Image (tube, coloured by chain):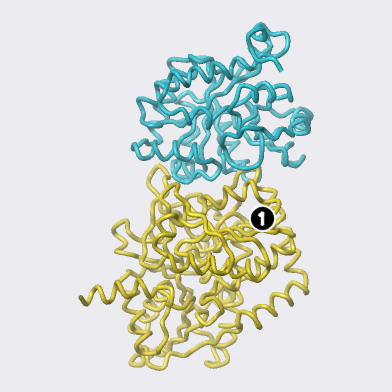
Chain colours: A yellow, B cyan
């Protein structure tokens, strides 16, 4: 390896020895691609003409209108595929082609990253297989169909707790035997080096655009940038270009689920402890022996018991702060945005929005807040019907 | 001299390869697990490898994953595992015991404390499946400080500089994997180990013991012929569940195949 993939004491590359050559090849290909103007041009063209970048920065006209705050939404929900994930699956897909791979594998929770990977597989002509917890396959038939429609095969995972983390385990096991012809398209800025660095670099376009856009409309930098954190890819993509701007507060919002005092949440940074999971040293929800706990959230994208190592580091250095938003508050923000702005956010993004609303309500002077609206809420409709109509009944 | 060194010396005098038997500690529960460990020795295992169950075992195939799940479902804790090792050590003072586990269990207990608790229980070595040579230095140092052998994995695709690093950091034996992929039984071994064993010898790495996919007595003999100092069977044994008789029998058949040409065992062992 050229780099150790460390963010302070977090990160690294904790995989079985036999998998190291695959990660070395990936690091080399990534570093080479970063220096290659042809790769940049090809990716840029895809992001512009296929995915629809740049995405707009929308000022909320009604939401929080009674407060001194102005909330801006970075509209990753308008990206092709409906979420920020498209940014990095296109980049990793290109990289897989460059490495001469013929097959993609990926893990997925509720199916969003699976759908994104299937899209890349179709576009680049790569055979695509998606590992998905058996229970999730049952619950998310529509996303399973989407993946299949784009030519991917969905493999139900019956081991362990049959959830996202078990799907990651299974994808890693597959890759251990298949890496000569297969690229593992990991879905977030976690996992072994070089994934956390690579995924950040492929997602930082979000923050780069947002920073330019807010400077243009406001003539100054915002007081706060807010993004939800599951594995942490949309947040790290949003934060990275703002890190040197010390006056800008970077706030990551974790799923506090049914409350931080219980066990049903996904707040790894707030409630986790030092550990090593899925190839990286980071914060992990676990028991005192180190057995990994199941996380919980109404939003599948925040339902992960570890977090990207760079977030653990940003928390430790104090450059970013992390807060929790409970299911109910996220759901209220989800409704508020729909009702006041005509935008239906993903449950994940609604967590970030809920915290931005709280900041706005507490503000006693002018304040500019940029929220990463990482995805659209169409995928959450079935659950929203259950939660909202169910509550009325 | 360490228990591994004594074992390899003893076997060399008898002209035999080492047979290592793996079981998951606490599978299906603590009491049964203790009984099954004894059966390994009764069947003739030269060295015993034990897994400490982890919730997310990425290097393991379905059989060993299921064993870890059963142990965890039975409420087995890391302390219970050290208890089982201590019990085994009291009964079988000469048989080397190696721990196979995952980094997060060491992170949770504290790496140094995990190593010294393992040594105090009577373990001889530790292999951390998700710590590659890149990250191994502090683990090897902690093992050395606790007087445990630190065992590392080498594969046919392991490059030469990594082999040298393994030679430098590890002791006890070198866990060689028979193929790419995770643990589990296969009918045929992909034996491409001549180069690997030669590189390990040249680098003066600890003796190569071949694991991953050893399930038949014939494979034991093949592995030893290709230059391994021993073999480890895991999934094939774990698959037998709590049947101590079947376990004893399979271990005995596999141990029978460790005879090298000219040994006493050869007459009733496997003939290539």
Q: Residue at x 60, y 25 (%)?
A: B216
Say which element carries label 1: strand
Extreme residue toward the left, this view? A393
Q: Residue at x 52, y 82 (%)?
A: A78
Judging depth in this view, the residue of B247 and A304 nearest the camera is B247
- Depicted B238 relative to depicted A85: above or below: above
Q: Position of residue A277 (x, y in %)?
A: 50, 51
- Depicted B246 relative to depicted A157: above or below: above
Horizontal placement of B64 versus B186: left or right?
A: left
Judging depth in this view, the residue of A322 and A326 nearest the camera is A326
**Image quarter of the C terminus of chain A:** bottom left
Judging depth in this view, the residue of B164 and B195 nearest the camera is B195
Q: Position of residue A314 (x, y in %)?
A: 51, 65
Horizontal placement of A209 versus A77: left or right?
A: right
- Depicted B38 relative to depicted A365: above or below: above
Query: Splitting the image into 4 quarters, where does residue A163 fall?
Result: bottom left
Q: Position of residue B226 (x, y in %)?
A: 74, 25
Q: In this view of the protein, can residue A225 be seen by the observer?
A: no
Q: Residue at x 71, y 58 (%)?
A: A101
On the image, numbered disc 1 is attached to which residue? Answer: A182
């Amino acid at each position: 390896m050229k780099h150790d993939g460390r963010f302070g004491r977090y990160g690294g590359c904790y995989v079985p020895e036999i998998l190291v050559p695959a990660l070395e090849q990936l690091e080399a290909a990534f570093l080479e691609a970063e220096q290659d103007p042809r790769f940049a041009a090809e990716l840029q063209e895809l992001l512009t003409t296929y995915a629809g970048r740049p995405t707009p920065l929308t000022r909320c006209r009604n939401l929080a209108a009674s407060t001194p705050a102005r909330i801006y939404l970075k509209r990753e929900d308008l990206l092709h595929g409906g979420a920020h994930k498209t940014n990095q699956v296109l980049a990793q897909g290109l990289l897989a082609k460059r490495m001469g791979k013929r097959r993609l594998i990926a893990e997925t929770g509720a199916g969003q990253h699976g759908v994104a990977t299937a899209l890349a597989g179709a576009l680049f002509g790569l055979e695509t297989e998606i590992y998905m917890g058996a229970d999730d396959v049952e619950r998310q038939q529509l996303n399973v169909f989407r993946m299949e429609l784009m030519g991917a095969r969905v493999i139900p995972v019956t081991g362990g707790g049959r959830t996202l983390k078990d799907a990651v385990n299974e994808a890693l096991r597959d890759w251990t035997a298949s890496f000569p012809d297969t690229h593992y398209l990991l879905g977030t800025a976690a996992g072994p080096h070089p994934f956390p660095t690579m995924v950040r670099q492929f997602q930082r376009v979000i923050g780069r655009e947002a920073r330019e856009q807010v400077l243009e409309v406001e003539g100054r930098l915002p007081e706060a940038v807010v993004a939800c954190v599951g594995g942490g890819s949309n947040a790290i993509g949003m934060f990275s270009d703002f890190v040197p701007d010390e006056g800008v507060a970077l706030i990551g919002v974790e799923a506090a689920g049914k409350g931080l005092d219980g066990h049903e949440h996904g707040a790894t940074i707030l409630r986790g402890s030092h550990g090593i999971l899925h190839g990286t040293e980071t914060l992990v929800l676990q028991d005192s022996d180190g057995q990994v706990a199941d996380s919980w959230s109404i939003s599948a994208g925040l339902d992960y018991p570890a977090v990207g190592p760079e977030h653990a580091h940003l928390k430790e250095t104090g450059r970013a702060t992390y807060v929790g938003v409970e299911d109910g508050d996220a759901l209220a923000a989800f409704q508020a945005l729909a009702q006041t702005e005509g935008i239906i956010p993903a449950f994940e993004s609604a967590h970030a929005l809920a915290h931005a609303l709280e900041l706005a309500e507490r503000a006693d002077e002018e304040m500019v807040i940029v929220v990463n609206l990482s995805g659209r809420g169409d995928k959450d409709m079935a659950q929203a019907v259950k939660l909202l109509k169910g509550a009325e009944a | 001299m360490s228990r591994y060194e004594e074992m390899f010396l003893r076997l060399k005098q008898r002209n035999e390869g080492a047979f290592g038997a793996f079981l998951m500690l606490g599978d299906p529960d603590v009491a049964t697990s203790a009984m099954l460990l004894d059966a390994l020795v009764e069947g003739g295992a030269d060295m015993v490898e034990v897994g400490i169950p982890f919730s997310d075992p990425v290097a393991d195939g379905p059989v060993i994953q299921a064993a870890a799940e059963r142990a965890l479902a039975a409420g087995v804790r890391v302390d219970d595992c050290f208890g089982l090792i201590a019990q085994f050590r009291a009964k079988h003072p000469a048989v080397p015991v190696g721990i196979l586990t995952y980094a997060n269990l060491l992170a949770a207990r504290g790496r140094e404390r995990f190593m010294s608790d393992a040594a105090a229980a009577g373990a001889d070595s530790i292999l951390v499946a998700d710590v590659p040579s890149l990250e191994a230095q502090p683990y090897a140092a902690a093992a050395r400080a606790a007087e445990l052998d630190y065992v590392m994995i080498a594969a046919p695709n392991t490059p030469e500089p990594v082999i040298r690093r393994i030679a430098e950091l590890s002791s006890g034996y070198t866990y060689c994997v028979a193929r790419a992929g995770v643990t589990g039984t296969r009918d045929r071994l992909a034996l491409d180990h001549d180069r690997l064993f030669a590189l390990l010898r040249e680098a003066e790495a600890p003796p190569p013991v071949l694991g991953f996919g050893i399930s038949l007595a014939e494979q034991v003999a093949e592995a030893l012929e290709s230059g391994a100092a021993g073999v480890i069977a895991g999934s094939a044994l774990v698959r037998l569940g709590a049947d101590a008789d079947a376990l004893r029998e399979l271990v005995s058949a596999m141990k029978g195949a460790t005879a090298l040409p000219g040994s006493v065992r050869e007459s009733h062992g496997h003939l290539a």
